[in-house]
Image (tube, grey):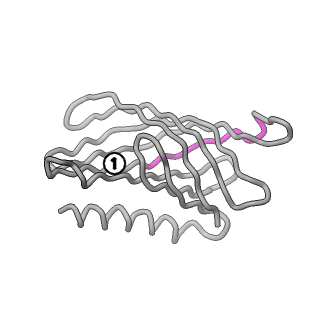
């Protein structure tokens, strides 16, 4: 079961990369809650999709957990310029699923943060915080946040 879920997560991320097209994709890591892989797909300069996949198979009790997030983000280029550098604020809405060995939780996620793309290097840095609400199987609030870095191609 663990391997099947892991393969499904990798397949979803790979499909997103394949359909993104040139110069519209970033792949990297997200450090925080959840810590894992991240993929960004540009739809336009002010709209993008953001995906995260995190997992823990090292639970001392023998269990596992996987967190999947997918967000649509709206960006505001030019809203925050510091010493000529455009640090882009963004807000979004998305879905989140937390899967463990005995429970599946599904809800929505509201991320917000700042994004910076280097001019002379294909690197993107972003700081993100998010509020969430699981709706299934029970209502429960969640929070997330961290620092991401992506290589853009």
The answer to which quarter of the image holds residue 152 is bottom right
Q: Residue at x 80, y 36 (%)?
A: 81
Label 1 crowd (10 A; few <14 / some 14-19 / many >=20): many
Dominant SS in magenta: strand
Q: Quadrant of the C terminus?
A: bottom right
- Across and down, in percent, residue 89 comes to 66, 36
Residue furthest right in the image: 84
Q: Is residue 75 above or below residue 41?
A: above
Q: Is residue 73 magenta?
A: yes
Q: Residue at x 43, y 31 (%)?
A: 131
Q: Nearer the viewer, residue 139 or 150?
A: 150
- Across and down, in percent, residue 118 comes to 74, 53
Residue furthest front in the image: 60
The answer to which quarter of the image holds residue 120 is bottom right
Q: Residue at x 55, y 35 (%)?
A: 112
Q: What segment carries the magenta color?
A: 70-79
The answer to which quarter of the image holds residue 96 is top left
Q: Secondary structure at mark 1?
A: strand
Q: Quadrant of the N terminus?
A: bottom left
Q: Is residue 37 magenta?
A: no
Q: Is residue 3 left or right of residue 42?
A: left
Q: Is residue 37 above or below residue 130?
A: below
Q: How many marks?
A: 1
Q: Nearer the viewer, residue 34 or 62?
A: 62
Q: Is residue 35 left or right of residue 124?
A: left
Q: Is residue 38 above or below residue 107?
A: below
* Residue with the mark numbered 1: 67
- Across and down, in percent, residue 44 comes to 67, 54
């Amino acid at each position: 079961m663990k391997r099947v879920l892991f393969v499904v997560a990798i397949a979803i991320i790979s499909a997103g990369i394949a359909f993104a097209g040139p110069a519209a994709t970033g792949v990297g890591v997200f450090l925080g809650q959840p810590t894992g892989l991240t993929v960004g797909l540009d739809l336009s300069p002010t709209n993008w999709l953001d995906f995260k996949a995190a997992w823990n198979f090292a639970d001392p009790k023998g269990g596992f957990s996987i967190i999947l997030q997918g967000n649509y983000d709206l960006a505001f280029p030019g809203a925050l310029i510091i010493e000529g550098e455009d640090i882009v604020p963004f807000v979004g809405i998305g879905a989140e699923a937390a899967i463990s060995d005995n429970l599946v939780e599904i809800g929505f996620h509201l991320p917000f943060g700042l994004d910076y793309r280097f001019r002379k290097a294909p690197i993107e840095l972003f700081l993100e915080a998010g509020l969430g609400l699981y709706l299934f199987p029970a209502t429960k609030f969640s929070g997330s946040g961290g620092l991401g870095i992506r290589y853009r191609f």
